[in-house]
Image (cartoon, helix red, strand yellow):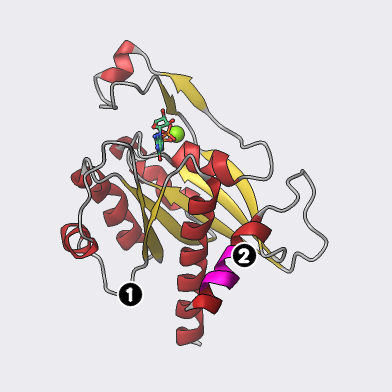
Amino acid sequence: MASKNTSETGAVAAATAEPGPYLAPGVAGAAKIMVVGPLGVGKTSLIGSVSEIEPLVTEAVMTRAGSRVDTAPAAKRTTTVAFDFGRMTLGGELVLYLFGTPGQPRFLPAWRGLATGALGALALVDTRDLSAAFDSLGHLEDLDLPFAVAVNRFPDSPDLPEDDLRLALDLLPSTPMTVCDATERGSCVRSLIALVRHLLTAATETR
Ligand SMILES: Nc1nc2c(ncn2[C@@H]2O[C@H](COP(=O)(O)OP(=O)(O)O)[C@@H](O)[C@H]2O)c(=O)[nH]1
Ligand SMILES: [Mg+2]
């Protein structure tokens, strides 16, 4: 157990050792990863926390017209109008290209195009409103895209046992679930590592 923790700490530290515009010389592979979830769950924050390049963010100030269709937390003043994009190198070898995908139901038809070539997804969940995650999770299942769940903790998030969360979200036992703070890099990297491990296991099993 101790060695797993040590290697995980090392992997987190090595994730973006040298942020910059150029790929690390040892990069051997790349994966397109979607970061999905409802409005306000923390997608833009997570990509901003881990990206080693200036993330491409397509935020717009929410208008009164938009507020009729997008129900957002009171403190939220902007919304993603296309998608977020960032890049993170894991262990100096594997580059993850992260596509943050708007969670509002009207964007769901666009997912089919955005998901083309994606290896998997990190589904962000807010325990203050679990039902808001259903659209994204359902769509991942429709697209047959493997995913891991990351519970983004806010200061006022209720503490729910993992089993209850799994039941409420109807997750398979094999679906990884981590807890993160989208504004804190280390926890976001750990969630992405859990996803990549899951994708590697799935790929090995189907070989
Ligand atoms: N305290 C705290 N605030 C967060 C966290 N994640 C997101 N936020 C805040 O919640 C709001 C919505 O986050 P955002 O990343 O824009 O959500 P998105 O709509 O999924 O892209 C922003 O004001 C963030 O600063 C978190 O883990 N902790
Ligand atoms: Mg956003």
Q: Main secondary structure of the magenta part?
A: helix
Q: Position of residue 3 (x, y in %)?
A: 55, 78
Q: Is residue 76 above or below residue 24?
A: above
Whether 135 is among the magenta residues is: no
The magenta stretch spans which residues? 5-9
Q: Is residue 169 above or below residue 98?
A: below
Please state which of residues 135 and 108 is positioned toward the viewer in this rendering. Answer: 135
Tell me if label 2 and label 1 are in contact, CB under 8 Å: no
Q: Position of residue 114 (x, y in %)?
A: 49, 49
* Residue furthest out toward the right: 25
Task: Determine which residue is flagged by label 1.
Answer: 174
- The image quadrant that residue 37 belongs to is top left
Name the element at disc 1. Answer: loop
Q: Ligand 2 shows up in which quadrant of the image? A: top left
Residue 89 visible to the viewer: no
Name the element at disc 2. Answer: helix
Q: Is ligand 1 less than 8 Å from the beta carbon at label 1?
A: no
Q: Earlier in the sequence, mark 2 or mark 1?
A: 2
The residue under the point 45% across, 86% down is 205
The residue under the point 48% across, 52% down is 187
